Amino acid sequence: MSDKNFEPRHLETLDRDLDRLSSLEAANAFVARPMAAPALAAAFILLAGLFAAFLVDGSNGALVIVLAAAIGAYMAVNIGANDVANNMGPAVGANVLTMGGAIAIAIIFESAGALIAGGDVVSTVAKGIVSPESTQSADIFIQAMMAALFSAALWVNIATWVGAPVSTTHSVVGGVMGAGIAAAGFNAVNWGTMAAIAASWVISPLLGGVIAAAFLWFIKERIIYQPDKIAAARKWVPVLVGIMAGAFSAYLAVKGLKKIVKIDFSTALGAGLVIGIAIWLILIPVIRKQAKGLENRNRSLKTLFSIPLIVSAAFLSFAHGANDVANAVGPLAAIVSASSTGDFTSAISIPFWVMMIGAFGISFGLFLFGPKLIRMVGSEITKLNPMRAFCVALSAAITVIVASWLGLPVSSTHIAVGGIFGVGFFREWYAERRLVRARQSVPDRPFHTPSERRQRKLVRRTHAMTIAAAWIITVPAAAALSALLFFGIRLVTG
């Protein structure tokens, strides 16, 4: 066979082989990409355990502390994957922040909130739900906390995998309750604390929804539907941002500075009022300059609300870090305290390295797994724009701040999602109200049929039902799983 006849056929075969190799490489990359995030998460969990081993080398209960640190890191990663979406989802859904920008801001402020202001809620989760004395020994108490922490982490992991924004607070509280009942019976649970927490699960989404709807009503009435929208925005946007700044300043005065100087609540409120007024006055010329040349349209208003929305999302991340770090390190802090000293009834001294595991684990989980639920929360429940998202973020921030200051482990998921539903349902009500007014002013105006009105619904009911079902099942599921794990630990340890 001549070279002239061989070369084209040879080259065709080579091209086919190269195509197969290229397809194989693409297939390997496609398979490996979903495995990269779990592998990195596993590496972080392992490093958390090694970090704990280095710090507690030779101390009492070192092996237990190392294992608990790894499980605490696992829980923190899952919190970042599931819960932080509620803080950044509105800003991303309103197209004010990119996914990368949202993750960067959340990592910084989540970590700061956890490390600066996370202590009070940790104590509530660790020993406020189950009475340590009822477990009779340090070993049983440690096993119960271990089962609670692991069961909560498993449940949140399952929920994240199926795409359900469950409450991590529900998970850990259910886990502690289930392990406490398995260890010492129903009398071990502080039912008064559980009742307060359960009440907060109902109150927090309602309060978040009402506050968000109230702010949106104010914005619509005072800005959006004014003849001169830009003039109205110049007047009221600085006021709204001042309210936000004052609320967060009061919170920081109570929580963030207490390690340096003691500040009572009334003094903190006064400081928040002063700072809020100062921010309001500072922003008046800033907003006036920013509004110069804008057209008298709703689209122009989005520009004025973008930066306040980013700031509110950052503050909300700080508050979330302060509140929800308890879900990762509350039981871990109790295990470390009981293992190191043998005393499981006294107040918990929370080591800084324990708080670090919670803070960095939340940030790591957000970075690896957060985008999926951020998109769901931000764009799949109801349509958000910067004004609506600002209302959601501000209402969620205020509610979380109050709860964290009280040391009450409310669910940030309930608050933020409640705010989103509040905005959506308010928009439906407000649109219907304007339609009725228009029909009264123009009697011959055509009205919408029932089917047309159903199509005008602005909130996806299927998401409402799915989220409600997930909220209802989380506590009993986590409690049952925790009880089973506790019995398994007891069986293995003898």
Image (cartoon, grey):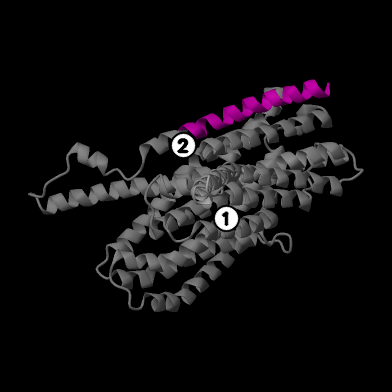
Cα–Cα span, label 2 and label 1 = 22 Å
Residue occupying the point 72% across, 49% down: 357
Q: Amino acid at mark 2?
A: Ile
Q: Amino acid at mark 1?
A: Ser
Residue range in magenta is 469-494
Q: Callout 1: 10 Å neighbours few (<14), some, many (20+)? A: many
* Disc 1, SS: helix
Residue 122 location in percent, x, y? Answer: 69, 45
Residue found farthest to the left: 444
Residue occupying the point 65% across, 45% down: 77
Residue found farthest to the front: 1
Residue occupying the point 39% across, 53% down: 384
Q: Disc count in the image? A: 2
Please state if 434 lies on the left or on the right of 347 as rendered. left
Q: Which residue is mark 2?
A: 467
Secondary structure that dominates the magenta span: helix
Is 152 one of the magenta-colored residues? no
Quarter where residue 194 is shown: top right
Residue 252 location in percent, x, y? Answer: 62, 61
Which is nearer the N-term, disc 2 or disc 1?
A: 1
Q: Is residue 428 above or below residue 468?
A: below
Q: Callout 2: 10 Å neighbours few (<14), some, many (20+)? A: some
* Disc 2, SS: helix
Whether residue 356 can be seen here: yes
Q: Quadrant of the C terminus?
A: top right
Q: Which residue is mark 1?
A: 317
